[in-house]
Image (cartoon, grey):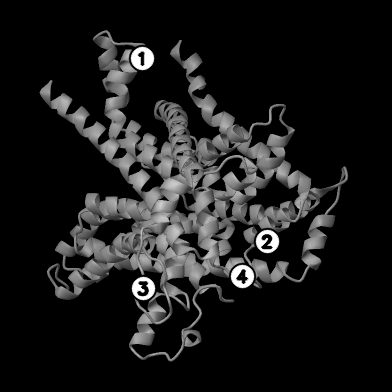
Amino acid sequence: MKKNFSFLYLLPQLFFTWLFLLALFLGLWDSFTVEGHVSIAHYKEIFTRGDTLPSIFYTLRISFLSSLFTLLLAILCSFLILHFSENWDSLKSILQLAIIMPHSLVALFLLFFLSQNGFMARIFYALKLISDQSAFPEFVYDRFGVGVILGYIWKELPFMLFFALPLAYSVDGKLGEAARTMGASPLYSFFFITLPLSIRQYLAAFFIIFSFSFGSFDLPYLLGNTTERALSVLAYQELQRGFMNRPTALSYNGIMLLFSLLLSFFYFRFLPKKKG
Amino acid sequence: MLVKKDPAYQLIRMLFLFSIVFPFLVLLLLSFSERYTWPGILPGNYSLRAIRSILFQRKALFFNCLFSIFFSVMVSLCTIMAAYCTAKWQSEHKESSLLSFCIFLPFMIPSSVFAMGAQILFLRLPFKNAYLSVFLSHVLYSLPYATTYLTEGMRNNIKRLEEQGRVFGASGFYLLFKVTIPLLFPYLIPAFMMSFILSMSQYILTVLLGGGKLKTLSLIMVPFIQSGERNLASVYGLLFLLSSFLLFLLMEMLLRGLKRREKVC
């Protein structure tokens, strides 16, 4: 008897998922229609613009590099954390503290710290390492996107640690410790035993943050260059130009959506299989 | 060999903690600063001008902040209720990868992509309410996090303890408030906080779907960050963090109060 009504519990999630898919579909549909009939005119238009392809490469570059560095740093940090047996509960609260920081505030700190007029520049000047404001290398508003990459690393590293460490802790506690009692060095037991067994979590987190940083708006908007812009910023600026430009903006979104779906496919391939 | 008490390791640890705490100190410093002329390492003049102007002169903006906190609390409550339903279903039925996909979909699709499509969707609906659209989209983007937390919580034999409660005569809302919620509290609190923070930090969703009517704290903060008015941006940033921190304290006190009552019984 109970089973007949239990599907009601699924209604909220179904409602929201349906809303989500509908919104995505409408956006995609509008990008493919020109005055009623299906055409790819909008996509043709944005690709003939000079800045779309460079923007795609720029966005790919900053999201891939930031996710890759985050992955490498997370693995290194995990080794240090596991080796020194850090307490997970206190670490968890510290990581949560870092995760809850909004992107706009991270942008503010990076501007304060790394801009040519910022804190590091002034320290370098005081230490006589640079002679003038403009001698300090450009970290924000630059063509390569260093500030944006650093901002993503600062935000995503705690997230990846938060996501992947619990499994690494349990694997290390059982199999890693077993290896160490049999004579393996801590370095060996981490890189050849703990890491291969928990790499799925790390890679799943990698795809999440890759996808997230590809479409994220806040950091590239606040810290990015005016000539090299991320796809999301291009879409936003297109939308700001007017109501008639909405399909063009939606075609930018279509590219981002395609990429996110591709990445989510990879994520679900790597999703850790639950035991039993 | 590396040892825990190694000074090199302690230094790394300190640096790590400092890099988390440093932004807060920066915010505090910048909120009081006036002019940050070139060679000086620290700001030259200090004053309470920025703080005063926000608290007393720009009354409308201050009330906007209060409203956005209230809005985010409502979003979090709704998120938790929806996440609880989903978690309950997941705990009672077989693991479904399709459902996992549906739950984690907002994780993978960027909010700007959804926001523009949602604009079209909400314009075509018969009732055009900016608050409702922003509310629903905030809940949507907080749901995956809340569901993850609550599914984890549901794994701890909630069902068995609920059945125990039913055996003793509890049912319906009494069961919910006296058995389920206290058991889930360690998971409800992070879920609530996460949804609250996410909702407060959302920028592009609120900008596009709110249509200018809805002003959250993020919306007020971002133009100041762009324009370079660091002191005002920092004060809003501090307000943001302070409100989250106060809420967190409130939750902790509630949790401790509940634990104390349990011990007494």
- Both on one chain, marks 4 and 3? no
Q: Amino acid at mark 1?
A: Phe
Residue A121 locus on image (x, y percent): 41, 80
The location of residue A10, given as percent across then percent down, is 51, 26
Q: Amino acid at mark 2?
A: Leu
Residue holding disc 3: B44
Residue nearest the observer in this picture, A9 or B134 = B134
Say above or below: A111 vs A42.
Answer: below
- Indicate the amino acid at tag 3: Gly
Residues at discs 2 and 4 in contact (Cβ within 8 Å) = no
Picture residue at 64% right of the left edge, 71% below the top: A228
Residue A94: assigned label: none
Amino acid carrying mark 4 in the image: Tyr
Q: CA distance from mark 2 to mark 1?
A: 50 Å
Give the distance between the C-alpha atoms of the residues marked 4 and 3, in whole angstroms. 38 Å
Callout 2 secondary element: helix
As rendered, which of A1 and B254 lies closer to the eye? B254
Give the letter of the chain under mark 3.
Answer: B
Mark with earlier residue (2, 4)? 4
Image-quadrant location for residue B84? top left
Which of discs 2 and 4 lies nearer the camera? The answer is 2
Packing grade of label 4 (10 A; few <14, some 14-19, many >=20) is many
Q: Which residue is mark 1?
A: B173
Looking at the rendered structure, which numbered label has been put on residue A234? 2
Disc number for residue A58: 4
Asked if badge 2 and badge 4 are on a common chain, one would say yes
Work out how far the residue at label 4 is from the one at label 1, CA to CA, in angstroms: 54 Å
SS of the residue at dot 4?
Answer: helix
